[in-house]
Image (cartoon, rainbow, N blue to C red):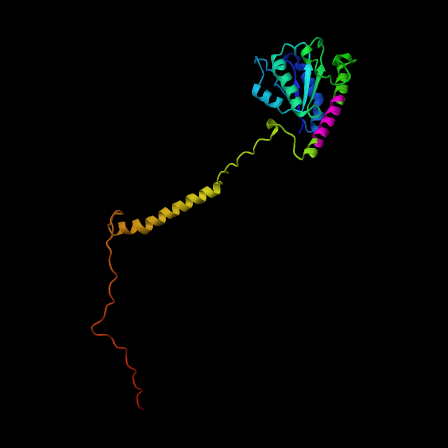
Amino acid sequence: MLRVYLSYAPADKDYLQTLLRWLRPLEQKYQLHVWHLPLAQPAEGKPYFWDAMLNELERAHLFLFLTSKNSLEATHIQKEEIPRAFKRQAALGSHLVQLYRIPLPGANGNTALDQIPTLGKVKQIDDWKNDLVGYEFLIKDLEASISELKRSWIEEQHRTGIALTLPADRPAPPPKARLKPIPGWLSLSFLFAIFYMITSLYFRECAPRRYHGLSPETTVPYLPSPEHYTRENPVTPPQAVPPRPE
């Protein structure tokens, strides 16, 4: 799965939202993972999630920088996103990690991003007759770049035999299997079994003692079984009567 990192200044969120809508077909076609800093809510001051941002910077394959005069004033772009993007490209190579900038109106003089090549043939989106034409050409150039980047990753994987990843790209270990709750019918069966054992023990041990006037704590002494009774005058079986003479 290719990861696309979108860099933008908060003041350029309108351009970001439009670009996200145009990227949705490519996201579904190439199974892209597109990430950007969450948009600020009206009541929020800074919408940045630094831990998630640094994690995505270390795992992205394609960096897209929305360049404008606002980008020069964004601290996180100048000090975090640009250096980390160049570092990752230097570690893996320009054929596996690509950086592009998308010029926005008023992007002249942004020297910090001049080292990043421009995506597409246009200098700015508003150089075209309308924005729709600019975004359409932009998406076509972006699709060609994504297709080439994906092919490079597949070739590199076949050449080396293993997936080329950095430590941050390694998949997280699967979560440990959690014990499933006991079904209700099984719990009810256990309760009935325990109730049966308790009642059986009561009627076998406690009930006879109470019937004979003994408390459950009383221990009945051992009584040997009585000996076989022998009669003094044993009974002899009757003798057969001879037949009567006729």
- Regarding residue 29, the answer to whether it shows in the image is no
Please give the range of residues in magenta.
141-155
Residue 200 point in image, percent of width and height: 36, 50
The residue shown at (39%, 45%) is 195
Which residue: 36% across, 46% down? 198
Q: Quadrant of residue 53?
A: top right
The residue furthest right is: 129
Magenta residues, dominant SS class: helix
Of 225 and 114, nearer the camera is 114
In the displayed orientation, state which residue is furthest to the bottom.
246
Is 75 situated left or right of 67 in this image? Answer: left
Judging depth in this view, the residue of 237 and 71 nearest the camera is 71
Q: Residue 153: say if magenta.
A: yes
Give the x, y percent position of residue 113: 68, 13
Q: Which quadrant would residue 226 be assigned to in this image?
A: bottom left
The quarter of the picture where residue 129 lies is: top right
Q: Position of residue 130 (x, y in %)?
A: 77, 14
Give the number of marks. 0
Residue 39 is situated, as x and y percent measured from the top left of the image, at 62, 17
* Residue 33 lies in the magenta stretch: no
Query: Compared with residue 98, is residue 179 higher up or lower down, i.e. above or below?
Result: below
Q: Residue furthest left?
A: 232
**Quadrant (top left, top right, bottom left, bottom right) of the C terminus:** bottom left
